[in-house]
Image (cartoon, rainbow, N blue to C red):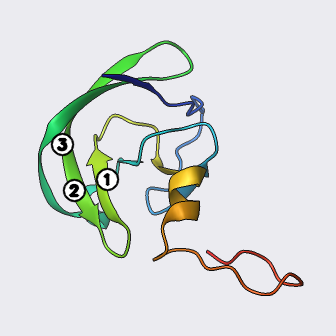
């Protein structure tokens, strides 16, 4: 299955401890293996195509504490979670009064 990830190619290194909230992506993907546990071969092999047209095969996944299963590949630009996935994950978000903001 080919999935698209719109991670820009940057000239500077993105902090490996950051998790980007990506509003264009459809894939939970991590670069930093120190942030996830239980790294294993995935049963759902995917191919990611970036904005420059480069394709990366992703055949591993791991568990992100408090979130769930994410794909893992050390060749991606950054750790990224789709905004949609974060918003629907009740472990990460909660709505509070209308005068306050969505907390992550």
Circles 2 and 1: CB atoms closer than 8 Å: yes
15 w.r.t. 89: above or below: above
Element marked by disc 1: strand
Circles 2 and 3: CB atoms closer than 8 Å: yes
Estimate the spatial distance between the alpha carbons at disc 2 and disc 3, rounded to whole Å.
7 Å
55 w.r.t. 81: above or below: above
Residue hosting label 3: 60
Q: Which residue is drawn at the image coordinates 68% and 79% (left, top)?
A: 95
Element marked by disc 3: strand
Q: Is residue 96 left or right of residue 23?
A: right
Element marked by disc 2: strand
Residue hosting label 2: 62
Q: Which residue is drawn at the image coordinates 80% and 87% (left, top)?
A: 97
Residue 60 at x, y percent in the picture = 18, 42
Residue hosting label 1: 70
Quarter of the picture holding the N terminus: top left
71 w.r.t. 86: above or below: above
Residue 69 at x, y percent in the picture = 28, 58
Quarter of the picture holding the C terminus: bottom right
4 w.r.t. 66: above or below: above
Pick the front one: 44 or 75: 44
Pick the front one: 22 or 19: 22
């Amino acid at each position: 299955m080919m999935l698209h990830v719109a991670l820009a190619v940057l000239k500077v290194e993105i902090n490996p401890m950051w998790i980007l909230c990506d509003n264009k992506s459809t894939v939970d993907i991590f670069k930093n293996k120190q942030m996830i546990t239980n790294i294993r071969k995935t049963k759902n092999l995917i191919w990611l195509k970036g904005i420059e047209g480069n394709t990366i095969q992703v055949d591993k996944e791991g568990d992100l504490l408090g979130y769930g299963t994410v794909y893992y590949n050390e060749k991606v630009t950054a750790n990224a979670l789709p905004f949609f996935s974060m918003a629907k994950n009740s472990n990460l978000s909660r709505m509070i009064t209308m005068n306050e903001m969505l907390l992550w």
